[in-house]
């Protein structure tokens, strides 16, 4: 249970502080000491909590003077208008973008979270697509790490 709680808390921190790499953390978990799906869910839930904080930061970004000044530039206004046109009124596309980002990391989910908040994307849609995408991502990371460790042990033991 400590592993699940620790993973959840580290996942929140890693969602907010980019230098804390959750994939490295998950890869370091000993194979015999984890339930892959439970740990993946804890990691995904923690990351989702952190990304929701980024979502609300995006929602209130116009209150921050530095961001407001940045957002008044022509380049930013054009980019915002482009994304606004793509996302607003298209929940399937918005969900697909947030899900794809949550699974792949491209574009970075922190950026998508801020953008989703500033565009007022449906919060329930954002949370559900990020949660499912992140759980899948971290399940794949855990399974991949387990496979690599198993393969390495097999290679070492056969030589």
Image (tube, rainbow, N blue to C red):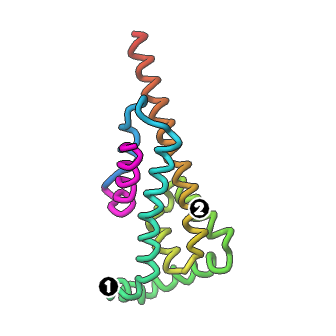
Q: Is residue 106 above or below residue 93?
A: above
The image shows residue 77 at horizontal and vertical percentages of 49, 86
Q: Residue at x 67, y 80 (%)?
A: 89
Q: Residue at x 36, y 88 (%)?
A: 69
Q: Is residue 10 magenta?
A: yes
Q: Is residue 155 magenta?
A: no
Q: Nearer the viewer, residue 21 or 106?
A: 21
Q: Residue at x 54, y 80 (%)?
A: 119
**Residue 136 got which mark?**
none
Label 2 residue SS: helix
Majority secondary structure in the magenta region: helix
Label 1 residue SS: helix
Q: Is residue 79 left or right of residue 73?
A: right
Query: To which residue does mark 2 refer?
Result: 129
Name, please, the residue furthest toward the top: 159
The quarter of the picture where the C terminus appears is top left
Q: Residue at x 43, y 57 (%)?
A: 46
Query: To which residue does mark 1 refer?
Result: 66
* Crowd around label 2: few <14 · some 14–19 · many ≥20 (10 Å): many
Q: Nearer the viewer, residue 99 or 46?
A: 46
CA separation in Å, label 1 and label 2: 30 Å
The image shows residue 34 at horizontal and vertical percentages of 44, 36
The image shows residue 1 at horizontal and vertical percentages of 40, 43
Q: Is residue 149 above or below residue 19?
A: above
Q: Nearer the viewer, residue 114 or 126?
A: 126
Q: Quadrant of residue 27?
A: top left
Q: Is residue 50 above or below residue 156?
A: below
The magenta segment is 1-19
Q: Nearer the viewer, mark 1 or mark 2?
A: 2
């Amino acid at each position: 249970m400590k592993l699940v709680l620790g993973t959840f808390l580290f996942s929140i921190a890693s969602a907010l502080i980019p230098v804390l790499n959750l994939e490295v953390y998950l890869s370091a978990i000993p194979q015999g000491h984890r339930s892959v799906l439970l740990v993946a869910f804890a990691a995904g839930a923690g990351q989702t909590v952190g990304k929701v904080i980024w979502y609300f930061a995006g929602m209130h970004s116009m209150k921050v003077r530095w961001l407001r000044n940045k957002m008044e530039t022509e380049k930013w206004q054009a980019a915002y208008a482009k994304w606004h046109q793509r996302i607003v009124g298209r929940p399937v596309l918005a969900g697909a973008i947030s899900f794809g980002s949550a699974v792949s990391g491209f574009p970075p989910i922190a950026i998508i979270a801020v953008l989703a908040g500033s565009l007022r994307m449906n919060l329930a849609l954002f949370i559900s697509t990020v949660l499912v995408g992140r759980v899948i991502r971290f399940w794949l990371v855990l399974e991949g790490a387990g496979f690599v460790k198993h393969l390495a042990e097999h290679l070492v033991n056969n030589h």
